[in-house]
Image (tube, rainbow, N blue to C red):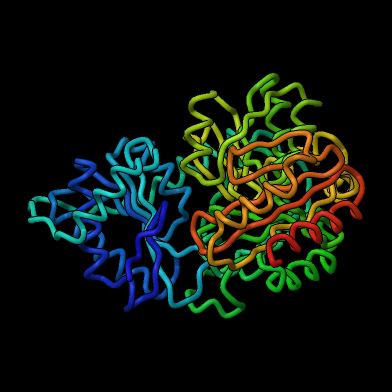
Amino acid sequence: MSPFKRYDIRGRLGIDLDEAVAHRIARAFARVTGADSVVLARDCRESSPALADAVAAGLMAHGVRVLDLGLAGTEEMYFATAHLGTGGGIMVTASHNPRDYNGMKLVGRGAVPLTDAAFAQVRALADANPDPLPGGSREDASAVRQAYVAHVAGLVGPVGRLRVLVNSGNGAAGPTLDALADGLESRGAHLDLLRMHHHPDGRFPHGVPNPLLPENRPQTEAAVRAAGADMAVAFDGDFDRCFLFDGSGRFLDGEHVVALLARARLARHPGAAIVHDPRVLWAVQDTIAQAGGRSVLAPTGHVFLKAAMRAEGAVYGGEMSAHHYFRDFMCCDSGMIPWLLIAGLIDRTGQSLAEMASALRRNYPSSGEINFAVPDPGAIVARVQAALASQALGLDRTDGLSLDFGDWRLNLRASNTEPLLRLNVEARGDAGLVAAGVARVRALIEG
């Protein structure tokens, strides 16, 4: 088994990934990028310190100066890589995967993702175990967090008086949230933050932090209602994603968060381009049009979103899976910036998050992502296209198959990271059309 996935490195400890493998990957990364300095960070998993030590040793064995952030989030690694001008960055994390997993996220200079060719070279050289090149060092670079805090605070702008429940899931978010809260307060923010499962604990006593799973949401839903908070935020393990709940405890669907963030960014950048994925898009496209922006489609996946943002000069890019990218943050994804922008939107408009979310749910109902394990995803997509394309008003192949029937639409695509076919159905103002559309496509997939 190999820990190399399409975009990053993830695998089961002792089976796909161990310290020796991490050491070889780090040496290969140094050789492929030619970096003389690399930022290193890790999450709070019990296996992460030892893996980070192995990565540092591998980098130093190739003559690299390692700037070590210690316990930090993936977005802090992105920021430090650009801010410190290093040749690359490595984050040791398995994000939301189970406890017996770990992995690595790799970026090049400026926090730009590695190209497919470079990533393939890292994999090949890791298998080949390149010769060492001595002369490296390891330094504590954790003080860069203050520069990160200043940058994020400047990007999000004023934040008013709101009561916000924050569930860090015992992941890496807690210390960074504390530093950011102090930085925002010094700039005049008046957030009343209620901290839940705040301290990093790699045993994950309240479950692995993955709020995208419905079964992981009830604690946050109940807590935000009990606290009388305006909203709640829940992070995944390395906090490159955040998930939002309104004051009534209802979870916000990913495409509705993208729509709200597009609205927030366009208020400060009129006429700008917004990049988004094509899985569920009507709420996003209508919001962008109403705010005077320009909608740009890109395939799902951070490599594609970031490339499209750079090509279009887009101010923001969003995926319904809760990855949110910002031009003023190296076109990288962040879990801290989105909820702060939403808090600012609430403060500026005087609308509660529950009011904004309710309107989006009513006007743009959707199915949520439905997964199917099928032996031949391409054949199934072809079957659905053959059966339904002649009835559609529009067909798009930006990512998988999208069919627009006027009052409802579907997107059907193979996963980039798992052996699954993923279906999304949406409608304009009619949840019954969503249910009917799902039933119709399901029959074709399973028939």
- Viewer-nearest residue: 244 or 183: 244
Residues 20 and 81: in front is 20
Is 280 in front, or is 87? 280
Which residue occupies 50% across, 44% down?
A: 302
Quarter of the image for residue 126 reads bottom left
Could you tell me residue 284's position as x and y percent? 74, 37
The answer to whether 302 is drawn above or below residue 52 in the figure is above
Q: Is residue 58 visible?
A: yes
The answer to whether residue 190 is seen in the rendering is no
Q: Is residue 134 above or below residue 53?
A: above
The C terminus - image quarter = bottom right
Side (left or right) of 373 relative to 106: right
Task: Find residue 431 and report its horizontal and vertical position in percent.
Answer: 89, 53
Q: Is 441 positioned to the left or the right of 301 in the image? A: right
Task: Give how far across and how far down residue 147 sits, in percent.
Answer: 45, 40
Percent position of residue 249, x then y: 82, 62
Q: Residue at x 78, y 45 (%)?
A: 161
Observer-nearest of 273 and 181: 273
| Total residue callouts | 0
Q: Quadrant of the N terminus?
A: bottom left
> In which quarter of the view is residue 47 placed?
bottom left
Quadrant of the image occupied by residue 127: bottom left
Q: Is residue 29 left or right of residue 130?
A: right
Report the residue at 91% width, 45% height from top: 429
